[in-house]
Image (spheres, rainbow, N blue to C red):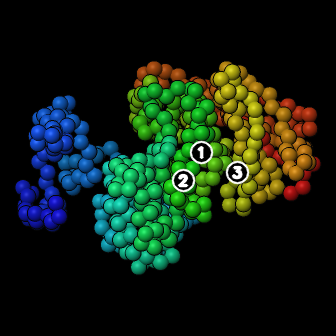
Amino acid sequence: MTQSSNQPGPHGTDDLRHRVGYAIYEVYVGRLETNGKFADFVNHAANGRGQTATYCSSTDPWHTVQDLSPRGDQTGWDIFFTSGITNGLPALITVPLIYSVPEDAAAMVAYLKKRGYPISWVEMDEEADGQYYMPEDYATLYIQFADAIHKVDPTLKLGGPVFQGINQDVSVWPDARGRKSWFGRFYDYLKARNREGDLTFASFEIYPFEACTMKWDDLYRNRELTRKTLQAFRDDGLPAAIPLMNTESNLCGSLSVFMSDIFSALWLADNVGSFFAEGGALYVHSPIEPSSIEHGCQGYAIWGNVLTDREGKIINYMAFYHAGRMINEEWVTHRTGMHHLYSVDVGIEDAAGNALVTSYAVRRPDGNWALLLINKDRDNTHPVQIVFESSGAAGHFSGTIRVVTFGSEQYVWRGADATAHADPDLPPVVSSVDASAQMVFTLPKASVTVLRGEVAGLTA
């Protein structure tokens, strides 16, 4: 198929899209036997259950006014930039690619610049792998769109390919050289044309677990999943200087009761910490908007931060909400300068060798140290004694230390029907203690804790 039929279809001739491309009635895949007969591997049937599953990389623009959803709408750029959600900072924006044309992307960028909206990065399309798109085809479009966008603003930083939720390298049908890595082949295509400079960041989504089979023990393998995900890009040839960005993430790709359980707070804290500890550059958790209860795998839950009733009245602030505030306001702090991340050894394990406690340490711009500690043990508290080590010297928390804890004592998700809710639903517990070298901190069961203060015994 090297030339489109260019024939008008049943929808008429008013739209070019009606007559560009190919209409495939049936596909036969198999092999020629020694007797010359064709052995078809495809089951052909008039219904989906009998037919062998097939996947296509594009769909017709079939949407009509009858397909509009009365339950919501997409937010326009003006509302997005003026709503306050960007905090007045340059925003990462996205442009459609596979189902669009370069001129549309250029026009959108021109509009945003004319309105004075600040842009940090431009993410090129979404989930090309989930569209069953070949990496070389995506790369071809990537270059075309990059040319169009850079004619408007040559300084804009572009990136992709926005993989759908992944735990490892994305494989694709092998090419003539036997290469199966989607990203590796995409990046090789750019390099072969001296266009790798157009990829200033690599982006992807994180949805590590299966909604219907998720269990508490999945928390124990979280950091290893993060490490494998990020390392796959480097193994595929992506230079260390190009940042890795998670631009969408949650526990899983469909609704799960674990999203509303205390499990979600522990996972979010551990996932954010491990992401940066393993070399990630930007982390976005989503969705965060208020929503009403729905039935998902293993029970009733919501996706985001705030549970509301059908009239929009707030019922609960969710575990995600409290953990997110602790991460962004207690562990790190915004608009104050550079944070420095340090490795932490804990050594608290169960009989199977699972790490029951994980921790991530930052030295904040104000000189204070903050430890994010996650106790993944559902049933037991764990005592910890904090020691800071550097070049043979040892230090410890000193003076008044801020302690912020949120866990199963503050939040429990209850209910097996549409009345499910959190009870108790209390905010994190905040306290202050006078620290010393011998002090032992007790981490409550199933909890996230932030310890913050000055450290004595070490120079900056």
Q: Residue at 75% of width from left, 32% of height from top?
A: 347
Q: Residue 430: give its label.
A: none
List the residue tagged with mark 2.
235
Q: Quadrant of residue 162?
A: bottom left
Q: Please give left or right for residue 380 compared with residue 132 in the image.
A: right
Rounded to the nearest angstrom, the CA distance separating label 2 from label 3 is 30 Å
In the rendered image, the quadrant that contains the C terminus is bottom right
List the residue tagged with mark 3.
332
Q: Is residue 280 above or below residue 420?
A: below
Earlier in the chain: of badge 1 and badge 3, it is: 1
Q: Please give left or right for residue 37 compared with residue 131 in the image.
A: left
Which of the pair 420/201 is nearer the observer?
Answer: 201
Give, as a three-letter code, the residue at label 1.
Arg
Q: Residue at 11% of width from left, 35% of height from top?
A: 46
Give, as a three-letter code, the residue at label 3.
Val
Rounded to the nearest angstrom, the CA distance separating label 1 from label 3 is 22 Å
Which dot, 2 or 1, sits closer to the camera?
A: 2
Q: Residue at 17% of width from left, 30% of height from top?
A: 50
List the residue tagged with mark 1.
227
